[in-house]
Amino acid sequence: MTKKKPAETKRTKKKTSEKPTKQGYKNLVIVESPTKTASIARYLGDDYAVVSSKGHIIDLPKSEIGIDTKNNYKPDYTPMHGKKSVITSLKKDAKSAQTIFLATDLDREGEAIAWHIASALDALDEKGRLKKDAPIKRVVFAEITKEAITEAFNNPRELDYDLIDAYQARRVLDRLVGYTLSPLLWKKIQYGLSAGRVQSVAVRLVCEREHERDEFNQTPYFRIIASLTNNDQPFNAELSEIDGNKIETKETITLFTGTYNFSRTILTTQADAEKHLTTLRTYHSLLASAVESKTTTKSPQAPFTTASLQRAAQTYLYMTAKSTMRNAQALYEQGHITYHRTDSTHLSEVFITDARACIEKTYGAEYVPKEHNVYTDKKKRTQEAHEAIRPTHVEGWEQTRETIFKTLGEKEASLFELITRRALASQAANAIYQNTTITLTPPEHPKTYTFNAKGSIITFPGFLSITKSMGEDTILPPITQGQQVTVSEFISTEHKTSPPPRYTEASLIKALEDHGIGRPSTYAPTIDTIQNRQYALKENNAFVPEDFGIAVNHLLVDHFPIVTDLDFTAEMEQKLDDVAEGKVAWQKVIGDFYEPFEKRVHEAEETIQRDDYKVLKELTETCPECGKNLQLKLGKYGKFYSCSHFPDCKFAKPFLELIGMKCPTCKDGEAIVRRTRFGKKFFGCSNYPTCTWAEWKDPRTPQDEKQQTSVKEDQTPEQNTP
């Protein structure tokens, strides 16, 4: 056997480093991202050197809470792991500069990075303010273009200490919640669990929705459809009234986050439908008793905010929130879009003028409204007072897209197109529809049954031409009032009332945003965290709570309701905004929360027993060793059966989640739900490892409705036992 060369068996990692700082410069520009250095440098002269801090360089320590709760909540900031060499390099570069420009991002996070860089350069006094003789200036810009960079460097400012205080308040608050609650969860449920201010609310939303779905009573109902023809053109009409009474009923139920509306008909059984079908089938034509036509308009949506971009990217591009933000970051750093963390729908006058000119040139003058469209932000924001997400230039944007495709990739190019079309469309004219409703009744008994046929035609596409979301017209044949149309057949269709839908990434982000929970930068990491912790996992692109998520949520709701309360969490966000506006000291905000919170933690440590939230169900089955009842419990690897007399009796056996069918391969074992070591659900045989059958798709699904995908052998985890 020939021995492979080392290069073939082990891939060596290339060392990467920034280019040496150029000599002879007078001004040092420090940004947080290495990718931004070249983008910014090309707009500055030889007197400037641009370097990066490679993100945060100073933070709270990971190994301890890092907050002195006895000394006005003073944070213990320390250099981050692996960043000491970066700090040394920045200090060396700073010594050669006459002026240092801190050009980090323009939000709280960016302001904090700039502040920490100043601290690392020994430029802060004992109060955390810039020393009077420090040669440091702050520059901010919402886009990396020549105009924006020139404007920023011509008008530098001081550090915004209110924004820095708002960052500190958020960082300290999240650290106190996480580092105080997580050890409690380790003691009472399972080591490795965590809680977080925004994260725990997101988990509660998912858990509450699952409970609401379980409580929802699905009921069947039927609709009756008339298949009609007029001059050989087929169309359908739906039964809407019987004896002058509407058959559609609307119902509303109260949910944790609001209300849920659904509808059904009064035809709740097949017998109900058949009774009317028997009568209807005696009619061979229907009379058009009324034909109504009206014009309606549809307005374009506002340009993207961070949250709406994340939702749209999932819907149209199938991108996760994390992927969306990563790709948007690349577009921003390359100067293609404005800053991508924003709550604002505001657009600059320059962009509006350019957009209107571009629309007129591309589509025609009729596509430009007389006055430019203005969008009002629903909620007052302080941190993100800049523009909506938009392209930096609209002239020749399609060529820019092709350039992005070649330099960055397909995902970035698609996201750029989505952003550009939405921003342009926001300044385009309304779409105009012609909607037609035809009311049809039996000629002999016009008041017995009433059918409606509805059609819609786009007469002027307006902004839809830009977004390419026109859809298909529903065209009805030309019918006049009093005309009879031929009936082909009457049929009934069976339906069921649908429970409230599970949250997708898009709808979960919308729920958090609607309730004022979190900020643009928190949504993607929050969704990432609840999946990594296996509190909720995706099934068919929707979140389903896992056992650990349910257990953690129950404990927090029972003992720390303020942590998962929507109103309280939103009020806390408002208080953080008040800090950013200089209205209140951040230490007071923390103190008002932490003092009663700490007391509640101590009480919970005393009152919560270890198994209070680990026992999922008490069983009537008895333990074969001691005769006590068994329990279904939550363990390190998921559910398992345990003796209720534990620890005196240590009997335990695996929990098998049966799906009600035999293994399709060995025909002997039971088909069960299993998990990979990363928590992803798949289906396997209870006789594993004797039988290695496994697949991702539910085997109960009819073969013609699924694409069967076998789990590769190296993807099959160890047996899930306690």
Image (cartoon, rainbow, N blue to C red):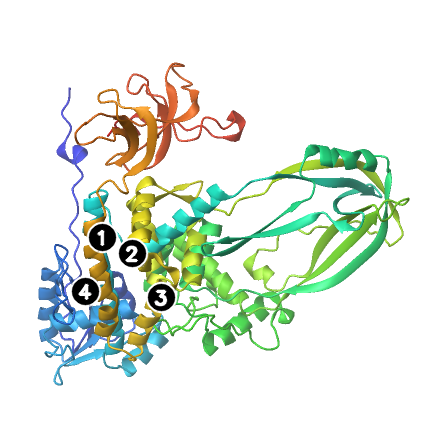
Q: Quadrant of the N terminus?
A: top left
Q: Nearer the viewer, mark 2 or mark 4?
A: 2
Provide the secondary structure element on which disc 1 rests: helix
Q: Secondary structure at mark 2?
A: loop
Give the residue at mark 4.
53
The secondary element bearing badge 4 is classed as: loop
Q: Where 700 sits versus 292, above or below?
A: above
Which residue bears the numbered disc 2? 560
The answer to whether marks 3 and 4 mark residues whose Cβ atoms lie closer than 8 Å is no
| Residue under the image location 76 percent in, 50 percent down | 245
Q: Is residue 332 above or below residue 441?
A: below
- Mark 1 vs 3, N-terminal side: 3
Residue 577, quarter of picture: bottom left
Q: Nearer the viewer, mark 1 or mark 4?
A: 1
Q: CA distance from mark 1 to mark 4?
A: 42 Å
Residue where numbered disc 1 is placed: 604
What label sits on residue 335 in the rendered view? 3
Q: CA distance from mark 1 to mark 3?
A: 51 Å
Q: Report the mark closest to the observer, 3 or 2.
A: 2
Front of the two marks 1 and 2: 1
Q: Are marks 1 and 2 in contact (CB under 8 Å)?
A: yes
Q: Amino acid at mark 1?
A: Ala
Q: Is residue 649 visible?
A: yes
* Residue type, mark 3 in image: Gly
Q: From mark 1 to mark 2, how far is it between C-alphas?
A: 9 Å
Whether the residues at callouts 2 and 4 have beta carbons within 8 Å, the answer is no
Q: Nearer the viewer, residue 184 or 80?
A: 184
| Mark number displayed over residue 304 | none
N-term-proximal mark, 2 vs 4: 4
Q: Nearer the viewer, residue 21 or 690?
A: 690
